[in-house]
Amino acid sequence: MIGSDPVDGGASGGCFNVDNMGVGVTGNYIDLYELDPWDQDDWVQRLGYDSTYAPLACEDAYYCYGESDWKHVTGRFLESNEYEVDAQVRMRLWTDLAFY
């Protein structure tokens, strides 16, 4: 029930309960494949990234939003040195609550 949560003093409820909290992810990686229509897809390389954290900021009782900083590649796992790919990763999250 809105306004009855003791965590925020019963003033707001909803998303304000998670204001200034966040989500962190470790062990981030992206596998890249060469997608060929005429044969099997070939694995090219895996890009590794540091842990990322996205803090939440609440605009109202129904909506919170957060995003991490951009992360650069910190590790490469190559099948060969034939390819060198660079990519950045970023995490975004949001809440959108509806009360019934």
Image (cartoon, rainbow, N blue to C red):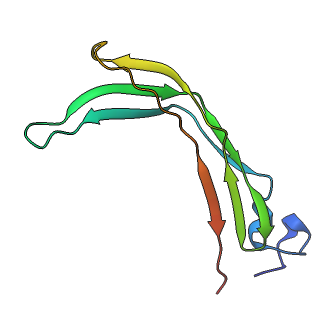
Dividing the picture into quadrants, the one containing residue 80 is top left
Pick out the residue farthest to the bottom.
100
Q: Look at the picture and state if 83 lies above or below 92.
A: above
Q: 91 or 20, which lies in front?
A: 91
Residue at position x 28%, y 17% in the image: 79
Pick out the residue farthest to the left.
38
Residue at position x 53%, y 34% in the image: 88
Q: Look at the picture and state if 69 lies above or below 49.
A: below
Dividing the picture into quadrants, the one containing residue 34 is top left
Question: Looking at the figure, which quarter contains the N terminus?
Answer: bottom right
Residue 70 position in % (x across, y down): 62, 37
Q: Look at the picture and state if 52 lies above or below 67.
A: above
Residue 60 position in % (x across, y down): 79, 72
Question: Looking at the figure, which quarter contains the C terminus?
Answer: bottom right
Pick out the residue farthest to the top.
81
Residue at position x 90%, y 75% in the image: 11
State left or right for residue 80 relative to residue 86: left
Q: 73 or 98, which lies in front?
A: 73
Dividing the picture into quadrants, the one containing residue 97 is bottom right
Residue at position x 56%, y 34% in the image: 26
Residue 24 position in % (x across, y down): 64, 41
State left or right for residue 68 relative to residue 58: left
Q: Look at the picture and state if 61 lies above or below 91.
A: below
Q: How many marks?
A: 0
State left or right for residue 39 relative to residue 16: left
Residue 8 position in % (x across, y down): 88, 66
Q: 6 or 13, which lies in front?
A: 13
